[in-house]
Image (cartoon, rainbow, N blue to C red):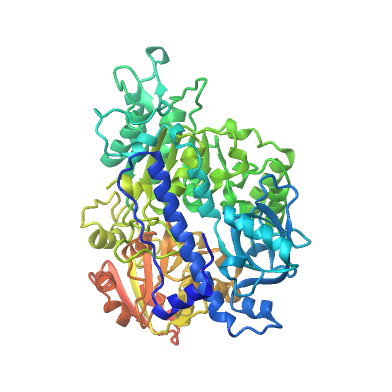
Amino acid sequence: LQFPTMERAMAVIKTKRLPKRTKVTPTQFTNTMQYKDIFKRMIHEHLQIMLLNNALHFYSNLSTANPNALERHFRSKGLSFYQNCQLKNNNRSISGSSFCLTLKNRENSYKYGKDDIWVVSNVLAFDASSTFLARSTFYGPSSNGSLEIECITPRDTRVASNMILGCSTVFALRTISANTEYMMLDSLEMPLDQLPLLPSLLKPRKKKQQPEPLHTPKIAAIHLTSYDNINVQAKLDETTREYSLNMDQQSVLQAVAKSLIISPGWNEVAEEAITLVHGVFGSGKRSNCVSHNDILFYGNIRKTDNEYIYIYILLTLNVAVDRILTILVKLGYDEFVRIGSLKKISKNLLPYTIKAKISGNDELKELEHMLEDPQNSEEETDNIANAIQRFRRCENMLELHKADVVGTTCSASCFEIFSESQFPFILMDECSQVMEPLSMVPLLRFKCSKMVMIGDPKQLPPTVATQADENNPGLGLDKSLFSRLIECHPSISGISNNLFYDRQLLNGSNVETRPPLLNGLPPLLFVDVMGNEQKSIGNSYWNQDEVITIAHIIQGLSKLEIHSSDIGIISLYKEQADKIQAYLANNFQKSLQNIQISTVDAFQGAEKEIIILSTVRTSSSGFIDKHPRVNVALTRAKRHLIISGSRNLLSSNDLWSKVISQCQGSINRYVYVKMNIKSRFVDTFFFFFF
């Protein structure tokens, strides 16, 4: 990695063509060395493009900088620039590549993170010969401004060492947060040959008669004998009846059981190391997860030996893993632990959390701070207080090794609490959103033998900060391991079924099983809002008329005694989500401030009875017609989907015109309403229905 020179940056600005990712993921790999090399190159290409974007921003503002107020100038432009910094050797460093950078004017602590990439130079122009790159080794500077940094390459170490000898102060630029990227790079340095799943990952279509290319550890399985007196098929049939599983769900349950359990006369060999489940929206993916749990634990089909302990671990988005664990709680099952960032865990699951850090009281302090939140409900306050008492008594430190189920995320799998843990069986939900090298982090750390992957490649792909080349969309870092291996309400699901799935989906529910929350409110409603889009400094968009319209819809639903927990608001732009959140906080009672409001990406894996979708744009459709993003947005509602937007604009877009036409398709099922916010919106809107 290198910080681009001014000449390089100016050349890019002249061409007006920003570099894009060009490297692609092959379908198969010859060996572990090729696997590591390809993904390392992909990650470095991605990081280099982000560094170039930072360089373009810096150099384009350098010419207008006041020499007497450099920090103020650059920080007003969104650049974390520091001058008069002290660079010293780190006496604790064994390798000699670690240094201490002392910052004179620190920023707020939340702006710093582990593995931030710092660019340090003794000249303001950051010339190549006088500049080095380093990554922060802790989460921020100390109280005196001292920050420990680790040089990225031996060349960076040499430049830093010479810089200490030749100058008194340096300039520093905090550029990109690369915590996830270094998590992936560090995992790729681990011995892949020790991963039992490796042959299936390298060559997923390998014929059975081909010899194994690697001496990998033996894949684990649950071995039953006649002495165990367990009829596996009878237990599967019982679970099918208990959870009312349809044929597809039964086949998934059967496949998972046969990949894990060896039983004489039923399954002699547990061959399949990886089970892939293409679970579209509303297909009962999480109910299936619970039924898997029922088979392995309630049914006592679980054994241990000297090498393995058979424990679930769920790796997914925070919101999705919380939903699965919440279902378990409702079923009376609590033999699980939840590990992750406390602020991202649902408050009703905090009593099941355990300390992720072996030492220190930071997590306890975070819980105590959460307890002071005036917006907590009585139940949430009790849950937080319960967690605090458990943390103080250290009751939960040993629970990780006793739990049948562990719920966490890919990123949290690197937490200190997991340092000695192995999980032979991993269930990965929403995995079509996870970059392949990020999926490998928990697989390598926990030495996984068996894996079930659940996802939908027609919904959102992995989020990558850099853009892919137009010729290779979805083929590089933005291609998930799931996608590589796998080469709602009936009225609502019908839209996505027609638009994205070639009408191949069969509804598991019907209109009778999903009655409306409000008689007269249709399952699908489009509200034509006469507004104007506005662009924020951060290049996001918002529409104030839509903000007010949605707020009044929320107010009307509240007056009709719809609970805020049943409502979700999705915006196609983060700025709009923030504006709606602020408007509700400033204009309505506390109960309406707890409604989940987020972007499409943050809402994947979540569902609500009523979803209000804000499309925002009025002059250009922008990226709101990206099929995976629209698919997710349209399929988060269980009973009612209310779409707010500009009919004139959306009707001119091929994708959205089909959505609106379905809204107008049947007066009994779809309703199209044109409203002006200057009218008495609440009265007219709800009079129309009720």
Comparing 117 with 427, the one in front is 117
Comparing 404 with 689, the one in front is 404
> Is residue 605 among the parts visible in the rendering?
no
Q: Is residue 128 left or right of residue 682?
A: right
Name, please, the residue furthest toward the right: 144
> 341 above or below 682?
above
The quarter of the picture where residue 440 lies is top left
Q: Is residue 358 left or right of residue 20?
A: right
Comparing 607 with 28, the one in front is 28
Residue 116 position in % (x across, y down): 60, 59
Residue 605 position in % (x across, y down): 43, 54
Q: Identify the residue shown where x is 61% and y is 51%.
A: 342
Quarter the C terminus occupies: bottom left
The quarter of the picture where residue 688 lies is bottom left
Comparing 454 with 570, the one in front is 454
> 650 above or below 590?
below
Q: Identify the residue shown where x is 73% and y is 38%.
A: 393
> 686 above or below 233?
below
Residue 456 position in % (x across, y down): 33, 52
Q: Identify the residue shown where x is 43% and y is 86%.
A: 679
Q: Is residue 215 left or right of residue 113?
A: left
